[in-house]
Image (cartoon, helix red, strand yellow):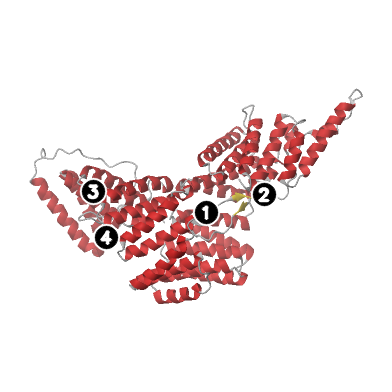
Amino acid sequence: MKKASLSLISKLNRQRFRGISPLLSRDYISVNSPSSSSPLHSMDHRIQFCAKTPGLVYPCRNLGTLVEKPNQLPSRQRKLKEKSDLEEAFESAKTSEEMLRAFKDMEACFDERELGLASLKIGLKLDQEGEDPEKALSFADKALKALDQDGKPSILVAMALQLMGSVNYSLKRFNDSLGYLNRANKLLGRLEEERVASVEDIRPVMHAVQLELGNVKTAMGRREEALGNLKKALEIKEITLEKDCKELGVAYRDLAEAYASVLNFKEALPFGLKALEIHRKELGNNSVEVAHDRRILGVIYTGMEEHEKALEQNELSQKILKNWGLSSELLRSEIDAANMQIALGKYDEAINTLKGIVQQTDKDSENRALVFISMGKALCNQERFADSKRCLEIACGILDKKETVSPIEVAEAYSEISMQYETMNEFEIAISLLKRSLALLEKQPQEQHSEGSVSARIGWLLLLKGEVPQAIPYLESAAEILKESFGSKHFGVGYIYNNLGAAYLELDRPQSAAQMFAVAKDIMDVSLGPHHVDSIETCQNLSKAYSAMGSYPLAIEFQRRVVDAWEGHGASAEDELREAQHILEELKTKARGTSTNQFPTKALPLPQHSLASRNSHPNVSFNQNSAGSMR
């Protein structure tokens, strides 16, 4: 990792004689968590460089203090002194350039394992600096080859593997990085199981590996899977760090943000609240950390549609940011507040807020574009479409110049603007903007989840336009990408499969439609519950698909489930229940008038493991939530 602590090898010279003992300091698991302007921006955890770096230690000094034997040759003494001097020069080196010069001098008189230890330290230093990852990789590779010669598990080998994973991550070689980190993780588990090293020695390296695994999987779009590693890293911190220290609070906030990024706001909330509790207690109500905690809580409450609570957190955060004079962060916070006002239906208030903010922005800045996007949204909600379009056009004009500088931020903005055009039924413009967004995101491997979301929305809009064959590839691509990013049981994936079912049914492919609806229903039942409105509609769609196939017994079975589900909603769903009962009677009539030999269609069992999506087509529901649910 870029901030991997060089203190990891602080006692390596004693390792030959006394074992590793307290090889790893608590500093190794300290995390630097820079604030992000994007509330859902994935966290870049980094292990901090320990200020107390005792340096690489070799047995030379110990050898130099041995009692001299009478027959010892002066030349040997000179060699020992030379090694000792070289070692001291290496230890006292403060910059990577000084370390590299000392290492070059050491190569002639140190053995391979000793040079492996030095290579590990240089690799850690270069990785921490982050300026030359290729050079860091070469030293990491030297260290691994030198330290892993005998094939025996050791902390040193685990550290070298972790360094290889970190450097490959920096080089965006995510598959290679994942391979080395998985090896390190497995090796550490073996060390713990076989008690080759103490838990105190293993734990800090394990933390580094888990944190880096979370980073790599996030970069690969495997965000749901990354959460498991990030949670393990937090658990190690909870054991190792002092209770309620600032650093632990940051770790809680980071995990809250990670859960929010996969739209799991319910899981995110307790971690966000814990972070706030710790930072208020340790740093006071007016600290910057508290402001950042309140920012992420605002995001979480917005996701939970508790907009009043979100606005309250935002206002408290703004007060702190004003006190500290953090104008850039304050500006973004004010834009967030306007968006919360829009969510609460306070459109005039939001517009007035935005008019004040726009005066503080530079002419062609990204912040100015964001202000006009929010202004366009407020005006769109007031059905002032001409004014809304003018604001959105201004925003697009600014963003067009920023595509190469800030591709991810611009892609997100295009996606947001497209939603406003979609609301105004300007589907062609909306699709065009989404395609521009997709083109930018396809070049950013760490934004795979956003790529899938945008692809899903393009498919949805093409369905709305009746361009069904063109919609299917986008929906299929979205399903595969988002399965990888969010897991196969995420509700958003279910919506996409439901939309695919609707598309296949429109193309008179009822068997393919039934397969998609069955997958969708399986996911909806798990992620939303069988009595959720969208789950019921997916079940209704599955009944329609079986009816189109002539498989009336199956169609009737699923329609009965629809009726039962609507009955559970009581008086609020009387119209839906009446319609469901009517469809059930029609199916029974069709079944009585049809010979069982007339439609020899193979029944399709519900899959045991799958994915899903929803909203409407003549008689089939397919859903725009497949797009918005992933953002």
**First-in-chain label (3 vs 1):** 1
Q: Amino acid at mark 3?
A: Leu
State the residue at coordinates (50%, 39%): 175
Q: Residues within 10 Å of mark 1 (few under 14, many from 20)?
A: many
State the residue at coordinates (10%, 48%): 590
The mark closer to the camera, 2 or 4, is: 2
Residue, disc 4: 569
The mark closer to the camera, 4 or 3, is: 3
Residue, disc 1: 255
Image coordinates of residue 330 in percent, x first then y, are 55, 69
Give the numbered dot on residue 542.
3
Q: Residues within 10 Å of mark 2 (few under 14, many from 20)?
A: many
Q: Determine whether the residue tagged by mark 4 lies in a helix, strand or loop.
A: loop
Residue, disc 2: 49
Q: Determine whether the residue tagged by mark 1 lies in a helix, strand or loop.
A: helix
Q: Quadrant of the N terminus?
A: top right
Front in this rendered view, residue 530 or 29? 29
The mark closer to the camera, 3 or 2, is: 2
Distance between the Cα atoms at labels 3 and 1? 38 Å
Q: Amino acid at mark 1?
A: Leu
Distance between the Cα atoms at labels 3 and 2? 56 Å
Can residue 307 be seen in the rendering of this structure?
no
**First-in-chain label (1 vs 4):** 1
Q: Amino acid at mark 2?
A: Phe
The mark closer to the camera, 2 or 1, is: 2
In the picture shown, does residue 537 fall above or below 187? below
Image coordinates of residue 399 in percent, x first then y, are 46, 62
Q: Amino acid at mark 4?
A: His
Can residue 54 be seen in the rendering of this structure?
yes
Image coordinates of residue 366 in percent, x first then y, are 50, 64
